[in-house]
Image (cartoon, rainbow, N blue to C red):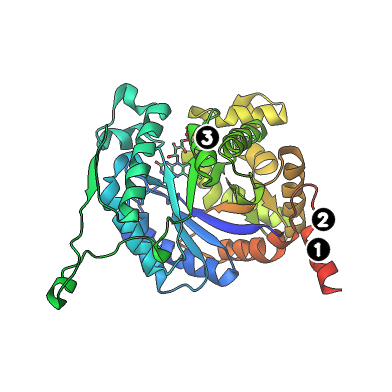
């Protein structure tokens, strides 16, 4: 089975971009990905970061809904500890109806302390175990709201209920029934969960609930660990883990040649973002240690060029296919090549060209370790 392609839009806009520019870039990117044949676009939610300046991913999704045809959208992620669960459940249900099913729900516990603080969560309460406890309570309330059956729940963090609805006996009663904000199709929508830390409680939750696991590539060991945590919980809950459902976010740039791709990443918006914003963050979150360990170098020596050569997936289509297949052999593979978006607002052409190559020249040639090469499978089917 060939790999899916997804875009994750954090969106890494350089400081100074206006809300209008970020919004426009989001919608333009969704249209370009839809045309290139991408399967999904995920959009982040951040209250605090100037480089990640989208507090409401649902607004971009709604604006893109009428201008795209097949691509699916997800917030990645709605940070559940920051939302009233009933309000969020209704908004999500309504949006998935607007998209007529081209929607799946992404949830996360929250990464940034300042964003948690703004939502009244501070000090010790910001640890990932506690945030994940809030995620679980929020999730259970949303499930109940979508079922549309009477309940009242007094939780540790939120109270919520669904009222008993009187049977409509007259035509007038019919006009006063409860609006239906259950997700498209009436059932629980597909869920995806972001996982980040080494002992990821989020990956455990995803496994238990059979949700789609979504990781950021943070080194071979961390990624193997994520899969182990997810699959152990998944099996324990009676499911069969499927690597095809695992999405992994990576920095990917595909050019016509290796040299062109490397130059573009080093000198263009991606390099700028890493030097100014992401390398310091990755050092703070310990991600550089994982990459340095994989390569056997001192973490302090891990700079942009090291990342471009050894960590990112950068090059011509052939090189990118080789790099991903090599990584798959070491780590086990995953189903979605989830490309991290960057700020090509001023000149989208190299970026859109890269996305097109990724969808058309790279993803169809990637196969899970042990499977027949995807391109060969296609050739065999065609013969
Ligand atoms: C692919 C991906 C996307 C994420 N998007 C967001 C986001 O939009 N906003 C945010 O505050 N945190 C985001 N996070 C971080 C999560 O909210 C959270 O900190 C992390 O998944 C917790 O993982 P853990 O349970 O493994 O510790 C993201 C994480 C990943 C892996």
Q: Is residue 171 above or below residue 106?
A: below
Which one is earlier in the sequence, the residue at label 1 or at label 2?
2
Q: Is residue 112 left or right of residue 244?
A: left
- Foreground mark, 2 or 3? 3
Local SS, label 2: loop
Question: Can you tell me whether the CB of the residue at mark 2 lies under 8 Å from the nearest atom of ligand 1?
Answer: no
- Mark 1 lies on residue: 377
Q: Is residue 323 left or right of residue 301?
A: right
Q: CA distance from mark 3 to mark 1?
A: 34 Å
- Mark 2 lies on residue: 372
Q: Is residue 353 left or right of residue 333?
A: left
Q: Residue at x 55, y 44 (%)?
A: 213
Q: CA distance from mark 1 to mark 2?
A: 6 Å
Local SS, label 3: helix
Q: Residue furthest top?
A: 124
Q: Nearer the viewer, residue 292 or 364?
A: 364
Q: Residue at x 35, y 35 (%)?
A: 134
Which quadrant would the N terminus be assigned to in this image? bottom right
For residue 211, say whether it is visible.
yes
Which one is earlier in the sequence, the residue at label 3 or at label 1?
3
- Mark 3 lies on residue: 204
Q: Residue at x 72, y 48 (%)?
A: 324
């Amino acid at each position: 089975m060939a790999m899916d392609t997804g875009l994750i839009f954090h969106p890494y806009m350089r400081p100074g971009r206006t809300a209008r520019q970020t919004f426009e870039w989001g919608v333009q990117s969704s249209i370009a990905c839809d045309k290139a044949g991408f399967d999904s676009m995920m959009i982040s939610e951040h209250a605090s970061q100037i480089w990640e300046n989208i507090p409401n991913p649902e607004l971009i999704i709604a604006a893109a809904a009428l201008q795209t045809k097949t691509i699916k959208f997800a917030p990645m992620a709605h940070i559940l500890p920051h939302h009233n669960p009933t309000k969020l459940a209704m908004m999500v249900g309504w949006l998935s109806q607007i998209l007529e099913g081209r929607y799946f729900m992404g949830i996360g516990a929250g990464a940034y302390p300042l964003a948690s603080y703004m939502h009244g969560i501070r000090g010790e309460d910001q640890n990932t175990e506690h945030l994940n406890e809030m995620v679980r309570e929020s999730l259970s309330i949303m499930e109940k709201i979508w079922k549309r059956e009477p309940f009242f729940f007094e939780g540790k963090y939120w109270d919520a209920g669904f009222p008993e609805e009187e049977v409509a006996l007259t035509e007038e009663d019919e006009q006063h029934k409860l609006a239906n904000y259950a997700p498209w199709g009436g059932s629980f929508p597909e869920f995806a969960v972001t996982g980040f830390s080494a002992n990821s409680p989020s990956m455990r939750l995803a496994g238990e609930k059979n949700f789609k696991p979504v990781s950021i590539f943070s080194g071979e060991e961390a990624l193997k660990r994520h899969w182990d945590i997810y699959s152990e919980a998944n099996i324990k809950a009676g499911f069969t883990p499927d690597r095809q459902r695992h999405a992994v976010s990576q920095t990917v740039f595909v050019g016509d040649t290796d040299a062109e791709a490397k130059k573009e990443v080093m000198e263009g918006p991606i390099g700028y973002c890493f030097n100014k914003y992401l390398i310091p963050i990755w050092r703070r979150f310990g991600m550089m240690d994982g990459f340095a360990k994989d390569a056997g170098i001192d973490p302090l020596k891990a700079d942009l060029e090291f990342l471009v050569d050894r960590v990112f997936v950068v090059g011509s289509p052939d090189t990118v296919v080789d790099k991903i297949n090599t990584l798959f052999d070491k780590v086990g593979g995953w189903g979605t090549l989830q490309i991290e978006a960057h700020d090509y607002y001023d000149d989208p052409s190299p970026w859109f060209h890269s996305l097109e190559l990724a969808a058309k020249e790279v993803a169809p040639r990637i196969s899970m370790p042990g499977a027949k090469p995807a391109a060969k499978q296609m050739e065999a089917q065609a013969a």
